[in-house]
């Protein structure tokens, strides 16, 4: 048992990167939450609805950029040696620049030619905000991939914390409209980008490496894009089914429970941002056996840490819901336990088999498994909420999480080419 904790402490000791990553993730998510509150208060229900609708469509496009550029970069980038790293990252930077320019044109033309005058006025600031925001997100993920966690923290201070301060100032001065909000997002993102580019290190663009990098990212990202689309469609279908069968009030109550159950997710995302590139580096230098050994030890401790949050949330579920959301949601308090079970299963999968498969670039299997389970999940959700109402929704959540975990575990065992590798890993674990 001590060896598991020593492995995790070794992770914590690496230049305080995990602690800083967790702190950055908490700050980043907190700034996003505060920004949403300020924008909602400043714009009012109607304009805030228009803003959320359009911004949500733009973020969907940015998600595809994450699948094609950011996700491959965080896995493939750490595997590059010193001689080729600047060529790889230079090619990825060029691809990001071209994609952000294309995003600017698409968003601007798409809104400019709308008959709705609100969309027409939002065209230029929305195009600038969305393209610059995508670049800002790319920069922060680039620093994560290269292990420069302190630079990520500064990037988020310039891009997110300064955004909150500006919104508070203009809301206090009563100078607030949707165009101002978008320009604030654009200018703060630009400040973050400029600082990031100046501190990005050596980057070299060569046409041969650009072509090679594009092909490798496409082989990785094409399946990730499809998987992202499937998950997005499944999420929308889930919302429609719950509202259709149970009503809007039940949908709100279920969302309250899922948010409370995922209370610790930002903390785990900070650790995951470190483990993804680290896993790729270990695989490249030491092989699959060492990677499995590393993920087993760190995953074991992270799973135990998640229980320290989930158990108190389950015990004090009623006071927490009443304090945060109000007594009107107390009827949903008992469902927190079911959501906590679902979260616990997802933690086990994320920090064990999922990281292992991502390090091996097994994105095709991840797409197939995600697609299959989501199709089954939507059908199962419709049946369970019809017969079991709200409880049926959480039963479907747990079933879907279990299918993903079991499927990934079975495939990992399938990837063991010989029994020798399996017994070698077993010997490492038992030491």
Image (spheres, grey):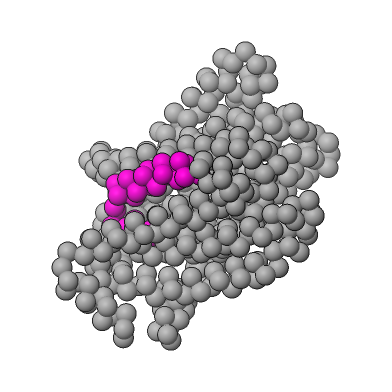
Q: Is residue 165 left or right of residue 419?
A: right
Residue that appears at 53% across and 63% down = 341
Q: Nearer the viewer, residue 172 or 57?
A: 57
Looking at the rendering, in which quadrant would you find the N terminus?
Answer: bottom left
Residue that appears at 83% across and 36% down = 174
Q: Does the magenta segment cover residue 8? A: no
Q: Nearer the viewer, residue 358 or 320?
A: 320
Q: Is residue 253 left or right of residue 68?
A: right
One can see residue 132 in this view: no
* Main secondary structure of the magenta stretch: helix
Q: Nearer the viewer, residue 114 or 89?
A: 114
Count of marks, rendered view: 0
Q: Nearer the viewer, residue 377 or 79?
A: 377
One can see residue 4 in this view: yes
Question: Residue 59 location in percent, x, y?
Answer: 53, 37
Looking at the rendering, in which quadrant would you find the C terminus?
Answer: bottom left
Task: Point out the residue furthest to the right here.
Answer: 173
Kindly indicate the quadrant of the structure image that contains residue 153.
Answer: bottom right
Seen in the picture, residue 285 relative to 135 is either above or below; the reply is below
Question: Residue 413 location in percent, x, y?
Answer: 26, 64
Kindly indicate the quadrant of the structure image that contains residue 208.
Answer: top left
Seen in the picture, residue 302 relative to 212 is either above or below; the reply is below
Kindly indicate the quadrant of the structure image that contains residue 242.
Answer: top right
Seen in the picture, residue 11 relative to 342 is either above or below; the reply is below
Magenta stretch in the rendered image? 354-381
Question: Residue 237 location in percent, x, y?
Answer: 51, 37
Residue that appears at 23% across and 60% down = 414
Q: Does the magenta segment cover residue 362? A: yes
Task: Point out the residue furthest to the front here.
Answer: 387
Question: Residue 312 location in percent, x, y?
Answer: 65, 71
């Amino acid at each position: 048992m001590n060896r598991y904790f020593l492995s995790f402490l070794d992770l914590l000791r690496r230049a305080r990167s995990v602690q800083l990553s967790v702190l950055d993730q908490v700050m980043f998510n907190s700034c996003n939450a505060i920004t949403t509150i300020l924008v909602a208060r400043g714009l009012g229900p109607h304009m805030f609805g228009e803003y959320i609708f359009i911004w949500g469509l733009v973020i969907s496009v940015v998600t595809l950029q994450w699948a094609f550029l950011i996700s491959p970069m965080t896995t493939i980038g750490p595997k590059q040696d010193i001689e080729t790293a600047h060529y790889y990252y230079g090619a990825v930077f060029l691809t990001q620049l071209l994609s952000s320019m294309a995003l600017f044109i698409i968003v601007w033309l798409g809104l400019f030619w709308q008959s709705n005058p609100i969309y027409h006025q939002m065209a230029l600031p929305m195009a600038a905000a969305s393209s610059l925001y995508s670049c800002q997100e790319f920069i922060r993920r680039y620093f994560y991939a290269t292990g420069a966690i302190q630079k990520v923290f500064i990037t988020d201070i310039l891009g997110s914390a300064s955004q909150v301060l500006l919104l508070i100032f203009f809301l206090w001065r009563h100078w607030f409209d949707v165009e101002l909000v978008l320009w604030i997002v654009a200018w703060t993102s630009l400040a973050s980008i400029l600082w990031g580019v100046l501190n990005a290190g050596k980057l070299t663009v060569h046409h041969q490496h650009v072509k090679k990098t594009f092909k490798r990212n496409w082989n990785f990202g094409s399946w990730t894009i499809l998987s992202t689309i499937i998950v997005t469609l499944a999420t929308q279908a889930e919302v429609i089914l719950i509202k259709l069968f149970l009503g809007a009030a039940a949908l709100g109550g279920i969302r309250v429970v899922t948010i409370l159950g995922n209370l610790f997710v930002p903390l785990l995302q900070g650790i995951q941002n470190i483990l993804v590139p680290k896993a790729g580096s270990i695989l490249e230098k030491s092989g699959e056996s060492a990677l499995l050994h590393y993920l087993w030890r760190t995953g074991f401790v992270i799973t135990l840490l998640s229980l320290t949050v989930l158990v108190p949330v389950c015990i004090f579920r009623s006071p927490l819901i009443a304090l945060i959301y109000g007594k009107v949601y107390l009827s949903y308090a008992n469902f927190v336990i079911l959501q906590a079970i679902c979260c616990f299963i997802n933690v086990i999968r994320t920090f064990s088999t999922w990281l292992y498969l991502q390090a091996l670039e097994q994105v095709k299997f991840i797409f197939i498994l995600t697609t299959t389970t989501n199709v089954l999940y939507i059908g199962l959700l419709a049946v369970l909420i019809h017969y079991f109402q709200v409880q049926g929704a959480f039963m479907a959540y747990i079933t879907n999480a279990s299918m993903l975990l079991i499927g990934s575990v079975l495939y990992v065992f399938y990837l063991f080419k010989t029994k020798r590798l399996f017994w070698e890993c077993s010997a490492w674990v038992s030491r």
